[in-house]
Amino acid sequence: MIELNNVAYSYGGDALLNDITFSLAPGSFHFLTGPSGSGKTTFLKLCYGALLPTEGDIRIFDHSAKDMGRDAVAYARRRIGVVHQDCKFLDHLPLDENIALPLTVSGQATPDQVANLNELMSWVGLTGKGDALPPELSGGERQRAALARALIMSPDVILADEPTGNVDWEMSQRLLRLLIELNKMGKTVMIATHDLALIRAAKAQVSARVLRISNNALQSAGVDL
Ligand SMILES: Nc1ncnc2c1ncn2[C@@H]1O[C@H](COP(=O)(O)OP(=O)(O)OP(=O)(O)O)[C@@H](O)[C@H]1O
């Protein structure tokens, strides 16, 4: 689905990521960990085509990221749902409009996807919050709304950047259960997190591969984490 071949990335100075080869298989569940500043967000951005590699090649749904035309980019945007670390919303728009924004912007919403909104709000536990403005939401509600927004286009792949960053343990478990449920429905999931307790909790429930960025390289994390 997403393949990185000998990829390096630099924001201008020395390479932040070096010689990374990785393949995201359909239906897999990955964690991506590593110290703050090691490049987890950068890696995810490469995976969804928001950044282009400085060296090497990235293939996203069989298109080289470097040569993707407008149609291929639009296709990839539909198939990859991203939960961003900062959970930004348009504060003047009610929550349901914020969540539906990817549909509105794409102009390609199918009736099924529109009907999906209420179901999605209920699934993430936000029934009744559709009229609320984003500043009126709690941290946990914002995180679940960010997940709902990532899912509105019915993507096959979910890339979640610290999706449990600002919530307590109980809420992080709730978010984790949602992501595991998505994986059990056949979605491919990758979660960037520095929360090793979350990874241990997940490994008891799902077969997950844990990767770590260390010294600019991507490695398999040890069993002890
Ligand atoms: N747009 C940018 N321009 C220049 N440097 C950047 C940019 N974005 C990130 N960086 C730098 O790249 C490095 C990796 O950042 P990144 O956000 O990918 O790390 P991370 O592992 O996700 O960190 P955290 O766990 O703190 O979120 C950091 O040193 C950061 O300052």
Image: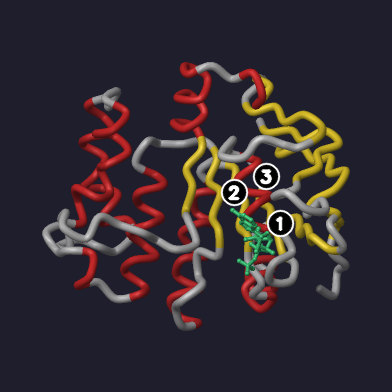
Q: Are marks 2 and 3 in contact (CB under 8 Å)?
A: yes
The alpha-carbon separation of the residues under discs 2 and 3 comes to 6 Å
- Are discs 1 and 3 less than 8 Å apart at CB? no
Hey, which quadrant is residue 9 in on the image? top right
Q: Is residue 104 left or right of residue 94?
A: right
Q: Amino acid at mark 1?
A: Ala
Find disc 2 in the rendering and name its residue.
189
Identify the mark nearer the N-term, 2 or 1. Answer: 2
Label 1: few (<14), some or many (≥20) within 10 Å?
some
- Percent of width and height locating residue 210: 76, 59
Image quadrant in which the C terminus is located: bottom right
Residue drawn 19% across the image and 47% down it: 97
Q: Is residue 170 above or below residue 150?
A: below
**Label 2 – label 1 distance at C-alpha:** 9 Å
Instruction: Please name whichever residue, 69 or 1, is drawn nearer the observer in this view of the structure.
Output: 69
- Identify the amino acid type marked 3: Ser
Q: Which residue is mark 3?
A: 28
Q: Position of residue 77 (x, y in %)?
A: 47, 32
Give the residue drawn at x 29%, y 64%: 125
Left or right relative to 104: residue 39: right
Q: Which residue is mark 1?
A: 208
- Of the residues under marks 2 and 3, which one precedes in the sequence? 3
Residue lying at the far front in this picture: please name it: 13
Q: Residue at x 24, y 44 (%)?
A: 117
Number of marks in the rendered image: 3
Q: Residue at x 22, y 26 (%)?
A: 111
Q: What type is the residue that disc 2 sits on?
A: Val
